[in-house]
Amino acid sequence: MATELKNDLFYTWYKIDELVKAVKSGSKTAESLVNKSLELAKKFNPEYNVVISLLEDKAISRAKKIDEKVKAGENPGRLAGVPFIAKDNFLVFGAETTAASNMLKGFIAPYQATAIERLESEGAICIAKANLDALAHGTSTENSDFFTTLNPHDKTRVPGGSSGGSAASVALGIVPFALGTDTGGSIRQPASFCGVIGFKPTYGLVSRSGVVAMASSTDTIGVFAQNAYDGSLVMDVMSGKDDLDSTTIEKPIKPISQLDLNLKGKKIGVVKEYFGDGLDKDVAEIVKNSINEFEKLGAEIVDISLPSLPVALAVYYIVVPAEVSSNLARHDGQRYQYSASEANDLNESYEKSRSQGFGAEAKRRIMIGTHVLSSGYYDAYYKKAQTVRTKLINEFNDAFSKVDFLAGPVAPTKAFKVGENDDDPIEMYLQDIYSVAANLVGVPAISIPCHNVSGLPVGMQLMAPQKSDASLFALAAQYGEMK
Amino acid sequence: MVKIPESKVQSQKSGVDSKYLVNGYYPTIGIECHVQLKTKSKLFSTASNDARGAEPNTLVNHVCFGLPGALPVLNKEAVRLASKAAYALGTRPQKFSKFDRKHYFYPDLPKGYQISQYDQPIILDGKITIHLENGIKRVINITRAHLEEDAGKSTHPTGEDYSLVDLNRAGTPLLEIVSEPELHNSEEAKAYAKELWLAMKYSGVSDVDLYHGNMRFDVNVSVSKDPTKFGTRSETKNLNSFKSVEKAVDYEINRQIDLLEKGEKVIQETRGWLDDKQKTVSQRSKEDAHDYRYFPDPDIPPVVLDEEYLMGIESSLNKTPEYWRSALEKISLSKLQTEALLEAQAELGSSYLELVTAQTMECAKTYANWIINFEVPLRRELLEKSSDLKIDDNIREKLFEQLYLLQKDGKLSSNNVKALLVELLSQNKLPDSVEKYAENAGYIQVNDSAELEQIIEKVITENPKPVADVQNGEMKAIGFLVGQVMKASAGKANPAMVQQIIRDKLKV
């Protein structure tokens, strides 16, 4: 009873609550759920290149332990037996963690990400590590050093990125939920491309400890789910202060999974700047129509402007490469993983290890980041970007004093063709144009699949003030039920 | 703002400065000092901070090793100690400070950057009073002091094609204290170094163990004929003793003057001190200087200290060296004894000052004498031999008490006090009765005049020549006779009493 066939391709899982109830009552075993996921992963992976590694033995042995707990009458946890997939930049104890980069290939994690730890302690079971753009740099998974994941809705198209493998795995129904990271849109954009819910929380709500860092001030840990209730439950389990990450915040007193479904009197601001040049006409229409549907649920739709929004992407591509160049400095070939086999001295070892281990995109970002932090350029780039970032934060605060939510598209296009943006890094960067602001400002944002009767999926983006994460799941839940 | 005519500034300055001139050159010295804070764990991880005697790379966790996904978490105790240091440096900690990343590649720097404080350090604008040998005091301004993590230790075995890295020290909390360039000779530089050492010890911020590198000094030295302008400076790094600070400063002043006199230029560079050769050598020039690409560390929220926190720190401050100096002055201890006690306590960690200042004036002087001349040399000897023996402060205090009474009663000679003190301290236990112990060990003076008279009679009979000398007014000879009596009594006679009896007998 765990899965039901939706059509020839996709599986829809019962809600996690129901799965857990079944496991706790003994009517379904954790092992059978894990086996189902493993079976689906093995079935789909050759076609779609969704996962980098399967954690078969580990997952089955964990599932057996959950089942033993149930038999012994112990509490197996809020996510007992629920299989999930983590993006391969999460460290899972004893498992390979590559971040899809040759730099980390073969790296066996000697400790575990707090997010994984918290999910496991509530009984969830990680069955595989998903593909991504190497080091989370990209918007299509084409930048994976290993292979490109294909879009479940159209195998000639990309699933989006960087968390493309996670998004595709939930779209295909391999697992009821998957973990991703969102630094500038890396959860929301693939969620939009793959037609699933993709959630990026308030900055600091989930610990970054044990997740390969991209840009520390905008990195967030979030979730892909088949329905809003599942997403909110997973977020509730992962959230909260962590002694291993000093940027974490306390979890809200009211559980994130406790959704307030009354939309009466809530205001949704449609952001003017999100519907300008560069936005695909189809996407614009679908997103606008979908936002307007919230009126049926009692919400008020108003227009709103965020004047600095058009420069958010420029700010992002200064601040983020600066932090990337710094965070990637530790990959120097001296202590772990990729190290050039031959070098005459220390400097040559650094140069060769880093130029051979990193791909073109990582090098591009390291060079941009190094440049904007160099003496003589710091004030003109990094410092100015931070000033504009502060302005953006103020504009968001101002907007949220007028409306409860901000709405717009997630990305300017639907899923594009594999190879379409190969020679154009700028076009690839522009995929992030609508999503980066939430990261720079630190507010929660969600991609909700629009009602789209034909063709490729499109997501709409909704943002809420910091710490109002649950309200976005409430919107998604209601919208989902209208379908 | 009052504008002072330039000529006046110059004349004032040169008037003050003339004593510093070396061959017509005016030396200027600024010192950067790295102090290891005595926290249990490292600055940004829970790994142990006590590297003494640990096998290489055993005090290392995922943060120290710079593993992917590892995040720094600021050690609150390090902030508390740095806050205490602020008061020891005559100021309050900044209510807002932050951490920045300083980038460079080196194998003992696992993350590829060092976490330090760049433009908003925890301490700004401090000062410290230095004490020079002629009794002169000078106030030296402290520009800033910031928290940062130490790097690991690299060793390069000679003749091998590899280097070794030990990350035990990586992440150790350091407070880097930067002075204004206000020191002008090696005596001042040394006095400054010593005063910082005392300040960091007495505030409870650091163990200040120089031998283990708890404090390292970098001296910036320049010379100039024009006292209103700085010359080009050199920076001699990693000096770990007061002596080497003094020597390196002298060496640099002389080297730079020699260069200028030969018509050559001083190069701005980093130099190292060779202790065996007593000279500095060039390590790298300014052209090799890195662009460190500082930026605020996004993993670490800024440090914000509120008034309540500062008041908590203020209520827990230790007594300062200046407090002890005036306390010792009140009981008339000499400056030499005062400084010796301050240093002894800082070096050996025993509560000498508390003990001495609790005594009456007479007793305090005796105690100070015993500590400085008997106990401190013994402790140093034990340390040198790496002896496990620890001398207990309580035992020492009770021992002093009893010995003082015995000496006052004339039962112990000063020589025997020393012997007995060293003997009992080395055992680190208190006999039930020190007097009985001393008696059994033969340290008690013979004060029985009948017994003494017998010996004295014998000495007078056996030494007619000195006796005659004494009787002829050559009083020096009386010392010889006393000495003979002491010898005959195996050191037990009370020399004052012996002299009196001899005088009585010879009627002088």
Image (tube, helix red, strand yellow):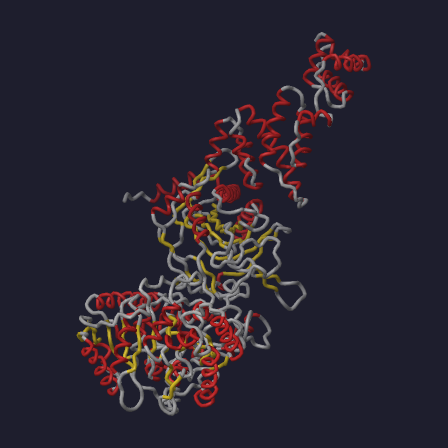
Q: Is residue A243 above or below residue A307?
A: above
Query: Is residue A164 toward the left or the right of residue A449 in the image?
Result: right
Residue A200: % across, % down:
34, 73
Closer-to-camera residue (B285/A449): A449
Closer-to-camera residue (B399/A366): B399
Q: Looking at the rendering, in which quadrant would you find the C terminus of chain B?
A: top right
Q: Quadrant of residue B475?
A: top right
Query: Is residue A276 toward the left or the right of residue B330 in the image?
Result: left
Q: Looking at the rendering, in which quadrant would you find the N terminus of chain B?
A: top left
Query: Is residue B308 toward the left or the right of residue B42 in the image?
Result: left
Q: Residue at x 22, y 76 (%)?
A: A273
Residue B213: % across, % down:
56, 51
Residue that sits furthest to the top in the current view: B507
Instruction: Please indicate, yes or no, whether residue A180 appears anywhere in the rendered image.
Output: no
Instruction: Please indicate, yes or no, whether residue A443 appears anywhere in the rendered image.
Output: yes
Residue B215: % across, % down:
53, 49
Q: Is residue B17 above or below residue B267?
A: above
Closer-to-camera residue (A407/B310): A407
Q: How many marks?
A: 0
